[in-house]
Image: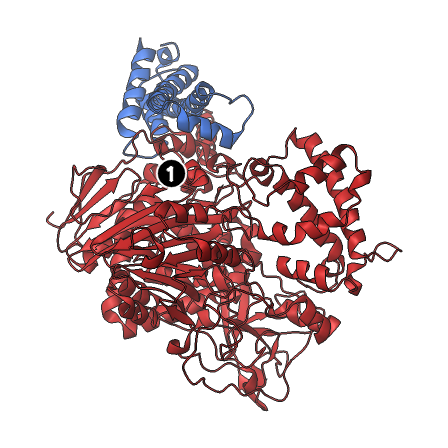
Amino acid sequence: MKLILRIILIAAITYVLSPYLTWWTGMGAAFLICMAMPSTLLNAFVAGFLGVGLVWTGEALVLDVANKSVFTEVIIELLSVPLIDNPLTLVVATGLIGGLSGGFAGTSGASLRHVFKKNKPQGYYS
Amino acid sequence: MKIFRFAFFFILTVALGVMLNSKVGVVPPLGKFLSPFHGFWKNAENEAINAPTQIASDYLTDKVRVHFDELLIPHVFAQNDSDLFYTQGYITAFHRLWQMEFQLLAADGRLSEILGKQALTYDRSQRRMGLGYGARNATELFKNQEPELFKIVDAYTAGVNDFIKTLDYDDLPIEYKLLDYKPEPWTPYKCFLFLSNMHKALSGGDTDLENTNALKLWGKDLFDILYPDKHAGIDPIIPSGTAFDFTPLPTPVPDSIYALGFANPIIEKPDPDNGSNSFVVGGQKTASGNVILTNELDLNLTSPSIWYLVHLNTPTMNVMGASFPGVPTIINGFNDSIAWGETNSRADVVDWYSIEFKDESRNEYRYNGNWVPTRKEVEEFEIKGDDSFYDTLIYTHHGPVVYDRNFTRQTEKMNLAMKWVAHNPYKEFKAFYLCDKANNYDDFVEAFSNYSGPAQNISFASASGDIAVYLAGQFPLKWEEQGKFIMDGANSRHEWKEFIPYEHNPKVLNPSRGFVSSANQHPVDSLYPYYIYDYNYDYYRGRRINDRLRVMENIEVDDLMELQYDNFNYLAFESLPMMLESLDSASFTGFDLDYYTTLHNWDYFNEAELDAPAIFKTWWDNLRSKLWDEIDSAEVSLIRPHWYNTYYVLKNFPDLDLIDNTFTPEQESVDDLFRITFKETVAELQEYLAIEGNELTWYRFKNTTVRHLLRIDPFSSKSVKVGGYRSIVNAASEAHGPSWRMVVELGEGEVNAWGVYPGSQSANPGNPTYSHMVDDWATGDYKKLLFDPTLDTGSNGIVYSILLDPSN
């Protein structure tokens, strides 16, 4: 449950603050939430990855659908990267980039907590 | 232990963040670029216009209303000039900011800052030619001598800057995100620099260095056959027989004329096709009795378009037409009383002077038997991803030394200073501002007395029925052939010192033939008392236009639109019969016969769907390559004679040594040349068909492309279905052509105007209207321009309105 709570918190902060702050707002959110709430490193990675990644995927999907994929197609042609050949793959790639950035930031946050909170081994399993 | 683990993950995270924040090679910074809250996703627009309907501004003194019509042309209604031009700057930036800035980085020789080392040679040539030097001079002069009008430039600048201030990263045009940089503040200097850049585009194509090489290599007799100033039978802009009723100023010829030495230019020249057509018919030739003016500007076909359409209205001004993004005022268009358009005059206003330095230090140069000091400036070139490059520029009283030991591949020690009208400060803004408000011919003439260049044939029509063309710009007063070759920089008598008086410039008002036209051809016949030279005057479009206008009567607007799209290939009409005649067609079979028959049956119109134009073009290209092989393979830079002169030499000088192909032992005649190149053409087209598929359809073969300024394919329109070609009235060639077409009909109390250009007002590839006029442009589907001083929110044809408000 804590995992789900973390994901929701990270996602909410990312979603609300990103429009006003930089693209790495999600990284900051994942870092802070995983530092504030005890978790294993793997767990923190998953929380950061899903928290940021889902928001990026969702937001990209919403914009793409609203635009009927017109501009997404143009950018796909521009990037001409293997595997990215339809709007959905670019939406997923966007989510992956967001997810990875959030995942590593979450892991960093959790590992910083571990430096200070030495005596809470239960945190490893929560 | 845990601290190390944290350090490991933290460094990894930061490294990932930095990586996703950085441009790697051509890959944009992926984190920034892909973020759905910031990156390219935010450039996808679902509506044609996304802007607040109300904008507050401290700069304004009164309310300004901007109404956009269906073409997204802004109709700006302000109460005073300052508010008007502020808004022009703001709105132009709203649609075209990236282009405005990019074009000026290029003009300023600063592309290396965003594109890296690949742009350095280009940047150096821009600064060495003194584009910035001229623009700085002009800014200073204008500020000091025209403080009132300078406020226009200030207001425009403030408008652009206020728009830039509204932008966060996510609002930036996509090109900034791709190249990963940010807009910098606009300055008045940039407005002047834009005009310097137009000077380069339209008068930077001089051939003085190549002329000098050819003269030294071949002597004057052959030179004059290959590169004559003019031919018999030209159809000049000012109709032959027009009287020049003034006493010309004297132009004494010095004893020694040429300072010869081989010189190899390395500056990339603007497209020699930069030109235009404009024709105006008087009331006696039109069905309605109204005058009709047309203009089409042949420039590089770029996206975003070089033009931005706008309607500017104050209580004292009501003008509409095409503007340059980055320049206040309207450059060609119409108001309630007049319409005007431009075609390039091409006259040689660039001269080169060979400079002899006293010693290696280059602190002094020889002039009239004395040593006079130079002025040096060190230019810094910032380069993305590299250390800065420094270049020392040396200025003489002639102008900047463009070619010297640091920027040269000369075979001998040669220093060349450039003297160019564009280095002289002048008052183009005043010319355009006054023309925007002109009521009649006298106002118009007065307006362009403030104009130095790039020299233009300005066509004019008024609602009261006058038609005219006036060569505006400063033309150096020269003796015969002065400046056609490299001049002696030490001899003051080789310099031009003054200009042809403006009132002596070629002009014609209401000629008896009932029309005026210009298409970059020779401005005058040999009766004009001054020397005006250019090698690249056009020989074809002007003749075609005049041939047609002479016989057309009861002209309607549609007829002139059709003439703008005329695809008659004058070159083929004159040269193809001679070429076909030489072939032994009786022996032809298969493709030989096929192509021969196609050409034989062709009516010389370069229509989009025909095969013949592709065959003719290929043959003509092969012919020129074979014919001018000595020129192409020479060790010094030379130019090929232009098309008309190629035809002229083939027809009149069949025994010329150059006609023989130097790579074969036999002596070739002109007929041999035609036969050999026809065979080559058939073979080449077979190869083309094998690779490109099964057709020679002209528009596909030609592949007219409206190319994005960064040459990004998905942002460009390829293989546009349009006929025509170079030197055809419909001048749409591969990457060049009619960048804006306008037709204006003027009568008493009546102004009707139509226009179309291959692009869109919005420069955002993510906007639904991006490039929306390209197909209309290709087929000649002109758009009626909304020109109504009473437009308001909700008026018919208005799709969006913005109120700029000083009150907040």
Is residue B588 left or right of B525 when viewed as pictured?
right
Is residue B612 left or right of B171 when viewed as pictured?
right
Whole-percent x and y of residue B712? 50, 39
Q: Which chain is displayed in red in the rendered image?
A: B
- Residue neighbourhood size for the residue with mark 1, other residues' Cα within 10 Å, grouped as few (<14), some (14–19), many (≥20): many
B317 or B23, nearer to the observer:
B317
How many marks overall? 1
- Circle 1 — which element? loop
Whole-percent x and y of residue B775? 43, 36
> Furthest-left residue in view?
B807
| Image coloring type | by chain
Colour used to depict chain A in the structure image: blue
Would residue B625 be seen by someone viewing this image from the given angle? yes
Amino acid type, residue under disc 1 in the picture: Asn
Residue at 37% x, 25% y: name it. Answer: A109
Whole-percent x and y of residue B452? 40, 70
Query: Which of the chains bears the disc numbered 1?
Result: B
Would residue B161 be seen by someone viewing this image from the given angle? no
From the viewer's perspective, is residue B105 above or below residue B239? Answer: above
From the viewer's perspective, is residue B678 above or below residue A117? Answer: below
> Furthest-right residue in view?
B665
Residue at 47% x, 52% y: name it. Answer: B298
Is residue B678 left or right of A58 when viewed as pictured?
right
A41 or A123, nearer to the observer:
A41
Is residue B673 left or right of B260 when viewed as pictured?
right
Whole-percent x and y of residue B727? 55, 53
Per the image, the residue denoted by label 1 is B764
From the viewer's perspective, is residue B121 above or below residue B788? Answer: below
Quarter where residue A59 is shown: top left
Quarter where residue B411 is shown: bottom right
